[in-house]
Image: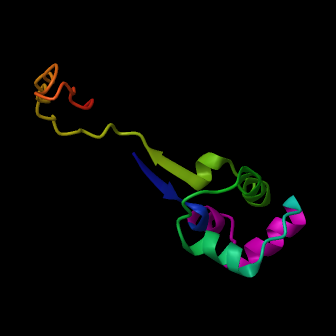
Amino acid sequence: MKIRWRLRMTAAQREVWTGTELRRLLAEKAGLELSSASVSALFTKEPSQVKMTTLAALCTALECTPNDLIEVDTTPVERPVAPPRRVADPPKAASARGRSMPPL
């Protein structure tokens, strides 16, 4: 599965070209105050995670839906066939000293 962050494209489609403009919209329309560095990171990098409140604020500010911001490719990934697992020999009941083998 592949996930693409489309904030920059979605913002551009709404004539929002800079992080400064996006930061102002977030504050005015959604009441979310983010630092310049945080907005810049959202605008220029693909985040590994996004808070739900931030996602909702972005959608409010840009008048869009999460589907506009996140593109998910659900094409199944083919996995290589794993070789069959070898079944271990059962442990011997006891050694010469009367001790059993530890569990596998």
Q: Is residue 73 left or right of residue 104?
A: right
The quarter of the rendered structure image containing the C terminus is: top left
Magenta stretch prevailing secondary structure: helix
Q: Position of residue 46 (x, y in %)?
A: 53, 65
Above or below — where is 83 with respect to 26?
above
- Span highlighted in magenta in the image: 9-29
- The residue at 61%/61% (across/down) is 10
Q: Position of residue 49 (x, y in %)?
A: 59, 57
Q: Magenta includes 52?
A: no
**What is the basis of the colouring in this image?**
rainbow
Above or below — where is 3 with respect to 33?
above
Which residue occupies the foreground of this view, 90 or 25?
90
Q: Is residue 90 left or right of residue 3?
A: left
Above or below — where is 4 with respect to 96?
below
Q: Is residue 79 left or right of residue 47?
A: left
Which residue occupies the foreground of this view, 41 or 97?
97
- The residue at 11%/29% (across/down) is 86
- The residue at 27%/29% (across/down) is 103
- The residue at 24%/38% (across/down) is 78
- Number of numbered tags placed on the structure image: 0
Which residue occupies the foreground of this view, 86 or 104?
104
Residue 74, image quadrant: top left
Q: Position of residue 95 (x, y in %)?
A: 13, 27
Which residue occupies the foreground of this view, 2 or 85?
85
Residue 35, image quadrant: bottom right
Above or below — where is 20 with respect to 92?
below
The quarter of the rendered structure image containing the N terminus is: top left
Q: Position of residue 71 (x, y in %)?
A: 51, 50
Q: Magenta includes 22?
A: yes
